[in-house]
Image (cartoon, rainbow, N blue to C red):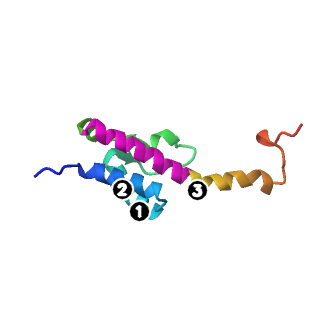
Amino acid sequence: MALPLPLYACWAQVLLTASHLQHWDVAARAAAVLLPRFIATKPSRLLWQAHPMDRHHLQLQQVQGASPTLLRLLVQAVYVYAQHTGMQQLPLLLQLPSAAGEGAGAGGLAG
């Protein structure tokens, strides 16, 4: 029996709704189910050998078999989840110039 909504579309909706409600633990669990289905992750390499774009790639067979609606939900879920995980690191980056004692703007160049 076919479900009225594909299972991975349900997980994408859970991720989007949990993110909207700021239930990040639920969003992380939904992402842990949804994202590996469509995005493959290679193991980390040494810093000087690695390129950030080489770590993740789409699983083309899964993407080609998915409906346009599911792909749209996937893209929305990836953006929302990436925005949240990136925002956690943003305060650390903003504190770096003040911690070094430099009040200059662009790259520490004071005029």
Q: Earlier in the sequence, mark 2 or mark 1?
A: 2
Secondary element type, mark 2: helix
In the image, residue 22 lies in the stretch drawn in magenta: no
Which mark sits nearer the N-terminus, 1 or 3?
Answer: 1
x and y, in percent, of residue 68 in the image: 29, 36
Disc nearest the viewer among 3 and 2: 2
Q: CA distance from mark 3 to mark 2?
A: 21 Å
> In the image, which disc is placed on residue 82?
none
21 on left or right of 109? left
Lower position in the chain sequence, tag 3 or tag 2: 2
Closest to the camera, between mark 1 and mark 3, is 1
Q: Is residue 5 left or right of residue 41?
A: left
In what quadrant of the picture does the C terminus appear?
top right
Q: Are marks 2 and 1 in contact (CB under 8 Å)?
A: yes
How would you rate the neighbour count of disc 3 (Cα within 10 Å): few for under 14, some for 14-19, many for 20 or more? few
The disc labelled 3 sits on which kind of residue? Gln
Rendering coords of residue 11 (x, y %): 32, 54
| Segment colored magenta | 66-86
Q: Which residue is mark 2?
A: 14
The residue lying at 36 percent from left, 45 percent from top is 39
Provide the residue designation for mark 1.
26
Magenta span: predominant SS is helix
Q: Which residue is mark 3?
A: 88
The reply to whether callout 1 and callout 3 are in contact (CB within 8 Å) is no
Q: Amino acid at mark 1?
A: Val
